[in-house]
């Protein structure tokens, strides 16, 4: 299949989606066309909406932004809705005020979960001395609605490498978390 055939097939699929009342957004169409172009070896047409808006932030700004997202998620709040509410009600957004002043609503609206995921690994790196909370799911079977539910325990990171870390609880007990950034990421979180 030539690149032109692939593009024509995708456009036919877009049309069929529209006809069946399940249209794709323009951004979804652009992403699919970009991936098809990359797979066929062509250089994809660049589009500002497909660029990661977080690339425009400094590493310090991304770190602050990520910490803000984590705090909001720990409180079961939408970080984007919180920022927008601050803006609409003309409240100061604290450390996130720089987004309103320097980047604005259009920039914020461009952020998608995939953009945040790209930088998650950059800002999630643990350091010795960091305070985190770990879930009992690390050492026992927990169920969302079972007799043993998820509980969180504060601890301190005492050793860290690329794939694991060792934590120390307040009683002095230590535990090594394997796959700390991968499969066990669900079982730890930053302490506010």
Image (tube, rainbow, N blue to C red):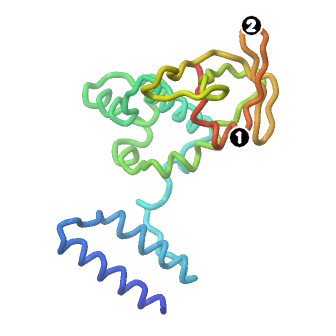
Residue 127 position (above or below residue 42): above
Quote the CA–CA distance across marks 1 and 2. 24 Å
Q: Residue at x 79, y 10 (%)?
A: 172
Residue 90 position (above or below residue 5): above
- In what quadrant of the picture does the C terminus appear? top right
Instruction: Give the number of the disc on residue 171.
Output: 2
Instruction: Provide residue 116's location: percent of width, then percent of height.
Output: 51, 45
Q: Residue furthest front?
A: 147
Residue 173 vs residue 10, the one in the foreground: 173
Instruction: Give the number of the disc on residue 64.
Output: none
Q: Which residue is mark 1?
A: 179
Is residue 18 found left or right of 53 in the rendered image? left
Residue 118 vs residue 133, the one in the foreground: 133
Q: Residue at x 51, y 34 (%)?
A: 65
Q: Residue at x 64, y 15 (%)?
A: 154
Residue 157 visible (yes or no): yes
User: What count of labels does the image hold?
Assistant: 2
Residue 31 vs residue 98, the one in the foreground: 31
Residue 63 vs residue 153, the one in the foreground: 153
Is residue 104 found left or right of 43 in the rendered image? left
Q: Residue furthest top?
A: 171
């Amino acid at each position: 299949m030539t690149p032109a055939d692939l593009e024509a097939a995708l456009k036919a699929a877009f049309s069929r989606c529209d006809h069946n009342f399940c249209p794709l957004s323009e951004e979804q169409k652009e992403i699919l066309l970009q991936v098809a172009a990359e797979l066929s070896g062509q250089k994809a047409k660049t589009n500002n909406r497909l660029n990661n808006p977080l690339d425009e932030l400094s590493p310090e700004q991304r770190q602050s932004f990520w910490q803000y997202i984590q705090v909001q998620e720990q409180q079961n709040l939408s970080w984007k809705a919180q920022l927008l509410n601050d803006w609409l009600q003309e409240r100061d957004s604290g450390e996130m005020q720089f987004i309103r002043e320097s980047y604005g609503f259009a920039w914020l609206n461009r952020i998608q979960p995939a953009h945040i995921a790209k930088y998650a690994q950059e800002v999630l790196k643990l350091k010795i001395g960091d305070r985190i909370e770990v879930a009992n799911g690390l050492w026992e079977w927990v169920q969302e609605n079972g007799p043993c539910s998820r509980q969180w325990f504060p601890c301190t990171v005492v050793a860290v490498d690329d794939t694991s870390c060792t934590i120390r609880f307040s009683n002095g007990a230590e535990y090594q978390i394997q796959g700390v950034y991968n499969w066990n990421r669900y079982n730890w979180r930053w302490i506010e």
